[in-house]
């Protein structure tokens, strides 16, 4: 089961970060498993009716984002998200929060219990940050999107469905 899921993640990684063309609808009904004569399980991806094609600059930006997250480099994350066309109202003044957000989004989720625990901790951290922001500068504006590429919506969808 783990090896099969690894193959699915690898297939999507190639689609996203190498080919720049990916199936944006990877739900369970669009996935089959083929068992070879030697018992090896292989994923079969079906129904490429919802396909997203990434411009080269975005494809490279998403690849840089994953790499920068793996290296935990805030400057790399900042460059990568700018390259894909993402910016929020705090990206310039608090880039570490962008790294926290994307690291949380692309985390290894584990079992449901650990997923819930991680999500709850992330929400709590964000609420504390908002409170601190209000105390420091009196701003009630909070964080909001300034630029949000359409492709990121589909990437969120793919991550959520694969998870």
Image (cartoon, helix red, strand yellow):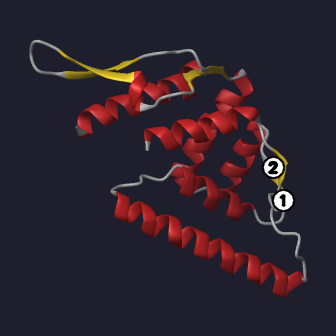
Q: How many badges with numbers are in the image?
A: 2
Provide residue 51's location: percent of width, then percent of height: 60, 19
Q: Position of residue 158 (x, y in %)?
A: 53, 35
User: Considering the numbered disc 2 on the image, is that residue within a helix, a strand or a loop?
Assistant: strand
* Residue 24 percent coordinates (x, y): 57, 27
- Placement of 39 over or under 80, stated as above or below: above
- Which residue is denoted by mark 1 in the rendering? 92
Give the residue furthest to the front: 29
Say which residue label 2 marks. 87
Judged from the image, the secondary structure of the residue bearing numbered disc 1 is loop
Q: Position of residue 33 (x, y in %)?
A: 27, 22
For the point 36% across and 58% down, the residue is 112
Report the mark closest to the observer, 1 or 2.
2
Q: What's the distance in space between the residues labelled 1 and 2, CA to CA?
A: 8 Å
Which residue is drawn at the image coordinates 83% and 69% (left, top)?
A: 142
Question: Which image quarter is the N terminus in?
Answer: top left
Asked if residue 20 lies left or right of residue 142, the reply is left
Do labels 1 and 2 touch, CB within 8 Å?
yes
Identify the mark nearer the N-term, 1 or 2: 2
**Category of crowding for the residue at label 1, using alpha-carbon neighbours closer than 10 angstroms: few (below 14), some (14–19), many (at least 20):** few
Q: Residues within 10 Å of mark 2 (few under 14, many from 20)?
A: many
Q: Note whether 128 is above or below 104 in the view shown.
A: below
Residue 163 location, quadrant: top left
Residue with the most extreme left position: 38
Q: Is residue 133 left or right of residue 8?
A: right
**Direction from residue 36 to residue 160 in the image, left or right:** right
In the rendered structure, the answer to whether residue 29 lies left or right of residue 134 reads left
Q: Residue at x 59, y 48 (%)?
A: 68
């Amino acid at each position: 089961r783990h090896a099969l899921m690894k193959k699915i993640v690898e297939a999507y990684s190639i689609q996203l970060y190498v080919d720049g063309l990916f199936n944006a609808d990877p739900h369970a009904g669009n996935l089959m498993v083929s068992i070879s004569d030697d018992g090896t399980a292989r994923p079969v991806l079906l129904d490429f009716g919802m396909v997203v094609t990434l411009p080269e600059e975005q494809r490279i930006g998403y690849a840089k984002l994953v790499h920068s997250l793996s290296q935990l480099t805030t400057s790399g994350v900042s460059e990568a998200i700018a390259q894909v066309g993402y910016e929020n109202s705090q990206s310039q003044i608090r880039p570490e929060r962008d790294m926290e957000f994307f690291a949380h989004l692309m985390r290894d989720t584990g079992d449901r219990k650990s997923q819930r625990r991680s999500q709850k901790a992330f929400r709590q951290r964000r609420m504390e940050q908002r409170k601190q922001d209000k105390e420091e500068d009196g701003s009630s504006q909070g964080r909001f999107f300034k630029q949000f590429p359409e492709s990121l919506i589909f990437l969120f969808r793919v991550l959520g469905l694969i998870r």
